[in-house]
């Protein structure tokens, strides 16, 4: 039946598996129609798939051979496309070697839509290792193919480079090959959706990276010479055509000087005006470091403001010393929907207070960072009437300052996900303030998660009462023991997931009352480090949630449940899951 599906249907199905290379490779062997539709997803980001294990010790010589073969196919495709188009690679004196570069089955280069330049550079470096490996050199046809590729790419005989030692020491040759590949690539990709430059950080990842790849991170290695060409790719012929419709841009400052980096961003802003998502890693982590050159924030501001449909912006590892970036975002407030800040710090809260003016935000996430002030308060939800997701995770001291001048609404009816985790820096006053705001202004929560210093359950009761449609609750209490019997008087008829971490105390009778009046579809319960949960509590769960509960986990509990009750719980859950599976199969 699947073999009779039209190509459009197959393509739509395969799009859901676009990141599953194993399934896509399996589809290649079904028939030609499946192969044609699967190949375009495999080659959408080929070097990402080839180097998926690059940051782990699991990347071995076997993976090097696979990367080398893929890169060789890629280079052969570039050469073939250039020859048939009548490009400058066509040369009568060199064409005798070209037949060895056989035509590919597909125009693989034409399928590329996502390109990480550092992955491409690493793939070229791996191909260079691969073609001079002892196994490769033992195959006469492979050696002839290598020599033909070199001859076509660099327009010179390659016999002098038969020795790996000579090739390693010739930096000019490495640069020439890289420039030639990049030039052909920019000339042949019809449209690039995502461009990224996210190099491996040797200071952080060198210890965990594969032993076979460490050679590329050493000073003077091929890889370092190759990646120096990344910044100049924007000036290659037809780069403006290839990049004109860029939708995503991801970059991490590394290896390049500030002036070159800032100029690249300015040049990109003149070519690309339709970027929807920008992820920018400043690669600075410490407040005590000297304020970075303002050229980068100024250039990033220009890039942001030049985009007519910027939807998402993510900033990483940055110390804000100026207003530039946030002002740029403020000028895109009409289109910006998602803002994510990871390890973004500031000595002056004024540099980030204008976030309150991003009135169309639907998602605001803030991970880590140091605001440098003990008087910081959470941004009021009433600044963002369209906000659906709000997350703060380990921000010191608590959150971002409130800007009352940016007040837009007196409620936040759209908020569905609230996550507030302060695992290291507890402040009861700030926790109370932000939870009270949720209870007062947000009435449609679906997901509530809090790991902070909660001194009273009254605020939690306010939240649960004002949001009767809650489906997922995760609350953590590691500091003081709190009784939550009052919370169990609230009706939550749609609760599906409940996780209680820490010392929450409640009676079995109150638990029974809550489950009886709410009758929630509570399928998952997780309890950890609880000091009150005993056999009567488990008995209530099994009776009230029979035919509903599918997952029950207890972790590091203070009181051990009896063997009989644990066996009974396991049997009931397994029987229910078996019956449900049987019913599905019968249908």
Image (spheres, grey):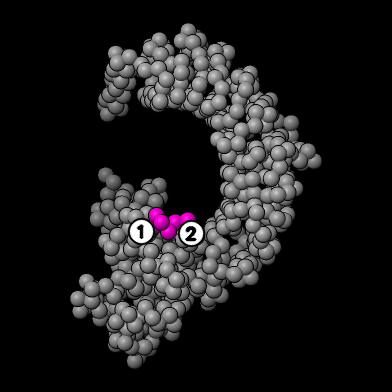
Judging by the rendered image, the residue that carries numbered circle 2 is 203
Bounds of the magenta segment = 204-210
Residue at screen point 35% across, 58% down: 210
Disc 2 secondary structure class: helix
Residue 554 drawn above or below residue 189: above
Closest to the camera, between mark 2 and mark 1, is 2
Judging by the rendered image, the residue that carries numbered circle 1 is 210
Residue 390 drawn above or below residue 45: above
Magenta includes 208?
A: yes
Alpha-carbon span between mark 2 and mark 1: 15 Å
Disc 2 packing (10 Å; few <14; some 14–19; many ≥20): few
Residue at screen point 31% across, 87% down: 160
Residue 277 located left or right of residue 54: right
Q: Position of residue 256 (x, y in %)?
A: 56, 69
Residue 55 located left or right of residue 462: left
Q: Position of residue 175 (x, y in %)?
A: 45, 78
In the image, 478 versus 160, the foreground residue is 478
Q: Earlier in the sequence, mark 2 or mark 1?
A: 2
Which quarter shows the C terminus?
top left
Disc 1 secondary structure class: loop
In the image, 515 versus 282, the foreground residue is 282
Residue 444 drawn above or below residue 272: above
Q: Main secondary structure of the magenta part?
A: loop
Residue at screen point 22% across, 71% down: 135
């Amino acid at each position: 039946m699947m073999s009779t599906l039209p190509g459009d249907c197959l393509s739509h199905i395969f799009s859901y598996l676009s990141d599953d290379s194993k399934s896509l490779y399996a589809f290649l062997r079904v028939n030609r129609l499946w192969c044609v539709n699967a190949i375009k997803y495999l080659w959408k980001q080929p070097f990402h798939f080839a180097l998926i294990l690059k940051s782990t010790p699991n990347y071995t010589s076997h993976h090097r051979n696979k990367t080398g073969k893929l890169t060789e196919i890629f280079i052969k495709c570039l050469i073939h496309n250039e020859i048939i188009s009548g490009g400058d690679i066509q040369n009568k004196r060199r064409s005798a070697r070209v037949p060895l570069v056989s035509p590919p089955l597909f125009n693989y280069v034409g399928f590329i839509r996502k390109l990480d330049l550092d992955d491409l550079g690493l793939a070229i470096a791996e191909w260079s290792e691969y073609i001079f490996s002892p196994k490769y050199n033992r195959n006469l046809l492979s050696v002839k193919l290598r020599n033909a590729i070199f001859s076509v790419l660099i327009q010179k005989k390659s016999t002098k480079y038969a020795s790996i030692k000579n090739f390693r020491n010739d930096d000019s040759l490495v640069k020439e090959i890289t420039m030639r590949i990049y030039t052909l690539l920019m000339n042949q990709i019809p449209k690039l959706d995502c461009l990224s430059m996210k190099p491996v950080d040797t200071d952080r990842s060198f210890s965990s990276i594969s032993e076979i790849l460490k050679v590329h991170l050493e000073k003077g290695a091929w890889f370092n010479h190759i990646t120096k060409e990344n910044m100049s790719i924007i000036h290659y012929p037809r780069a403006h055509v290839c990049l004109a419709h860029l939708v995503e841009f991801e970059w991490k400052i590394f290896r390049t000087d500030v002036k070159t980096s800032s100029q690249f961003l300015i040049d990109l802003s003149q070519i690309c005006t339709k970027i929807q998502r920008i992820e920018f890693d400043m690669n600075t982590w410490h407040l005590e470091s000297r304020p970075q050159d303002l050229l980068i924030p100024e250039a990033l501001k220009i890039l942001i403001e030049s985009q007519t449909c910027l939807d998402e912006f993510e900033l990483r590892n940055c110390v804000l010393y100026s207003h530039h970036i946030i002002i740029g975002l403020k000028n895109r407030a009409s289109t910006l929907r998602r803002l994510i800040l990871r390890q973004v710090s500031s000595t002056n809260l004024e540099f980030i207070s204008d976030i309150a003016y991003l009135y169309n935000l639907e998602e605001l996430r803030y991970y880590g960072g140091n605001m440098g002030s003990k008087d910081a308060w959470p941004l009021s939800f009433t600044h963002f009437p369209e906000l659906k997701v709000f997350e703060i995770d380990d921000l010191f001291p608590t959150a971002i300052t409130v800007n009352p001048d940016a007040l837009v609404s007196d409620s936040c009816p759209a908020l569905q996900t609230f996550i507030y985790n302060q695992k290291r820096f507890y402040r009861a006053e700030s926790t109370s303030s932000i939870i009270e705001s949720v209870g007062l202004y947000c009435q449609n929560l679906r997901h509530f998660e809090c790991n902070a210093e909660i001194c009273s359950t009254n605020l939690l009761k306010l939240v649960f009462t004002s949001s009767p449609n809650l489906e997922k609750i995760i609350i953590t209490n590691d500091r003081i023991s709190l009784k939550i019997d009052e919370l169990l008087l609230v009706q939550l008829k749609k609760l599906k997931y409940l996780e209680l971490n820490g010392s929450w105390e409640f009676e079995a009778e109150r638990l029974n009352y809550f489950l009886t009046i709410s009758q929630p579809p509570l399928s998952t319960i997780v309890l950890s480090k609880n000091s009150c949960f005993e056999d009567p509590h488990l008995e209530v769960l099994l009776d009230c949630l029979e035919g509903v509960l599918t997952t029950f986990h207890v972790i590091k509990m203070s009181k051990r449940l009896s063997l009989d009750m644990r066996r009974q719980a396991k049997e009931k859950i397994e029987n229910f899951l078996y019956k449900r599976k049987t019913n599905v199969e019968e249908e």
